[in-house]
Amino acid sequence: MCDYCIRHGAGGKWYLNAAHYSEEVVAKYNLREFLLEQYLNFEQIPVRRIGGFSPVGMDYAFRMPIIGRVVKMMAERMLHSRKGPANPFRPDGHIGQVVPLEDAEEILRHCAAEPIIEKNCMCRYMTRGVKEACCINFGVMSEIIDKLPRFVPEKEKYHLSRDEAIARFREHNSKGYIGTIWFGPFPYINNLCSCETPECAGLRPRVDFGIKSIYKAEYLIEFNEASCLGCGNCVAACTFGALSWDKVTGRPVVDHEGCYGCGVCRHTCATRALYLLPRDRSPALAGKY
Ligand code: SF4
Ligand code: SF4
Ligand code: SF4
């Protein structure tokens, strides 16, 4: 478990602590008003323009050695501050974590506050101009999106039952989209997303610039060589480059250090040779997120 789970997980994973989805948190931080204001102006919010959180526009700063180092340091300090959320606009600690299908199902089945909706992904829209319904929202976040028609999908079903939300998440996950769970803002959890890189504004600072904007999952991929057919499908499926191909053995090689534990490579394996192992069972990678 990460430091966050120890402080905020009530003995388990932080995102399976029902308190983070509760109306008490919404009322305590006045999140109805706060979130409505944020999402009314989502495309303009300054957090996308500072600290390199924008998937577009800040690259130049990161590529300049001195400015890049300063920006990165500021972003890390802001993200991993232990100060209380006096201003909920600033993230307090990590802002999200990769989750595999199994944990996403548990969130949707037992934790997510109703109503549950699926809205258009704004990261894809802002970077590619594509409206794709794949962000599952809960509770007060769903109420707010009801008031903002540009987020509401035109074709797909919008209000979902728990079973429908699970089915949608499975569909995205089997396409190779990365499951992610987000604070919005800390300590309220309201987004279960299905992301791609480099479009995702939360994943990109981590993947491209090494800022821990999001934590890797509580798991690592493991590989059972005896069951492998050597088809190579899984290597192409890993968006993080954690699987490579060994031409000599004709089998994939796992870079555990580079694995985010998303589990999506498993969907491409006909023989179930790939499986997830809890991160804390790996002596070398326990506690490294
Ligand atoms: S976090 Fe992921 S699914 Fe959500 S808006 Fe960004 S890319 Fe889309
Ligand atoms: S190897 Fe790791 S990071 Fe890559 S798809 Fe599989 S679980 Fe995800
Ligand atoms: S998808 Fe499965 S069978 Fe194919 S190379 Fe990967 S582990 Fe082996």
Image (cartoon, rainbow, N blue to C red):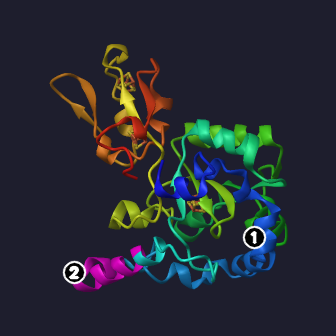
Q: What stretch is highlighted in magenta?
A: 61-76
Can you see residue 237?
A: no
Quarter location, residue 145:
bottom right
Residue at point 60%, 35% (across, down): 102
Q: Which mark is residue 38?
A: none
Label 2: how many Cα within 10 Å (few below 14, some 14–19, many 20+)? few
76 or 5, which is in the foreground? Answer: 5
Left/right placement of residue 196 relative to residue 139 reads left
Q: Where is residue 27 in the image (x, y as percent from the top left)?
A: 81, 72
Report which residue position mark 1 lands on: 150
Give neighbour class at mark 1: few <14, some 14-19, many 20+ (Cα, 10 Å): few
Percent across and percent down for residue 226 are 32, 13
Residue 65: mark: 2
Residue 156 vertical placement versus 268 (above, below): below
- Please, what is the three-letter code of the amino acid marked with disc 2? Pro
Q: Is the magenta stretch mostly helix, strand or loop?
A: helix
